[in-house]
Amino acid sequence: MLQTKYFKQLNIFAESDNVTSVKFSPDNNKVALSSNNGQIQIWDVCMRQEIHTLVGHSDCVNEVEFSTDGNMLLSCSNDETIGIWDVESGTQLLQLREHSHWVIGAKFSSDGLAIVSWSNDGKILSWDVTSGIMTLGLEVHFMCVLTVQFSPNGHIVVSCSEDNTIQLWDARTLQVVQEFIGHSGCVQSAQFSPDNRTLVSCSEDHSIRIWDLKSAKQVRTLQGHSDSVLKARFSQDGLMVVSCSDDNTIRLWDVASGQEIQRLHGHLSSVTAVDISPDTTTIMSSSHDGTVRLWG
């Protein structure tokens, strides 16, 4: 089994029942927190000091995401807009308006030149970052889309939905090229491995699954959560998956064996968001218990 550090709770980083997502910057030094009050906070992790409060959305901010170089931050909101922000100054660079429903999420491509976004009406849109112009749009799911992400090489995109399916599609043409079927409940999230060879997904069926991209076959099932799994993310080295669940726990998994490495207890309610720092030394989580916790 993979030998990894033993994580323990370092501190309660913040106390707020408004937090909707947590994301580390690529250099490990900052974290962005989005909230249901429409605000975004950027913090210095080591100093536990707020650097910026980004104000511009008029409704719940559902997700935030740093660009690969860490210079920009992407946000999406129930106000039907997407924001692109300069991390250093905290100013908004662009506001993208084409969605006609809540924007559930948005992701940068690995080169930072494109954005993919999705809304609760099932629509997925692609954008040019420089101009802010929408380039493509599609509907591949017949229910709410919950996660979309570019592959590390930027050639394909994955989407997952409340319709229990995962779709792979060509990033340039937006043509569906593969479908992954196996979950028996809503697929909450899906993410490519850093080496672009596998995919991890999690579902309200309590399972986490690892898929081979070429064959679209399931190669591993990670079992252990006793309630819906809300997020599952690869570590930067691709050797580990970290997950969070409605069962109030965070779990670390060995990708090669599918075995649970460690279970983190501390939250008193559903753990709604989790992220692991790029250097794999720190985990941050948020929960319905009103806390954001740092583990390391």
Image: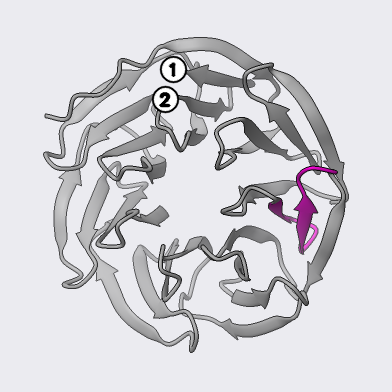
**Quadrant containing the N terminus in the rendered view:** top left
Label 2 or label 1, whichever comes before in sequence order: 2
Q: Are marks 2 and 1 in contact (CB under 8 Å)?
A: yes
**Quadrant containing the C terminus in the rendered view:** top left
Whether residue 186 appears in this view of the structure is: no
Q: Which mark is residue 94?
A: none
Whether residue 98 appears in this view of the structure is: yes
Horizontal and vertical percent position of residue 173: 48, 89
**Amino acid type at mark 1:** Gly
- Asked whether, in this view, residue 63 is left or right of residue 203, the answer is right
- Foreground residue among 162 and 96: 96
**Amino acid type at mark 2:** Thr
Residue 127 is inside the magenta segment = no
Quarter-wise, where is residue 185 in the image?
bottom left
Badge 2 local density, few (<14 within 10 Å), some, or many (20+)?
some
Residue 85 is inside the magenta segment = yes
The residue that label 2 is drawn on is 281
Quarter-wise, where is residue 194 in the image?
bottom left
Badge 1 local density, few (<14 within 10 Å), some, or many (20+)?
some
Q: Which mark is residue 296?
A: 1
- x 20%, y 72%: residue: 214
Horizontal and vertical percent position of residue 222: 20, 41
- Identify whether 37 is placed above or below 157: above
For the image shown, how many numbered marks are present on the structure?
Answer: 2
Q: Secondary structure at mark 1?
A: loop
Horizontal and vertical percent position of residue 146: 51, 58
- x 37%, y 72%: residue: 167
Find the magenta span and give its range.
Answer: 72-89
- Identify whether 149 is placed above or below 10: below
- x 17%, y 30%: residue: 2
Q: Secondary structure at mark 2?
A: loop
Horizontal and vertical percent position of residue 259: 15, 33
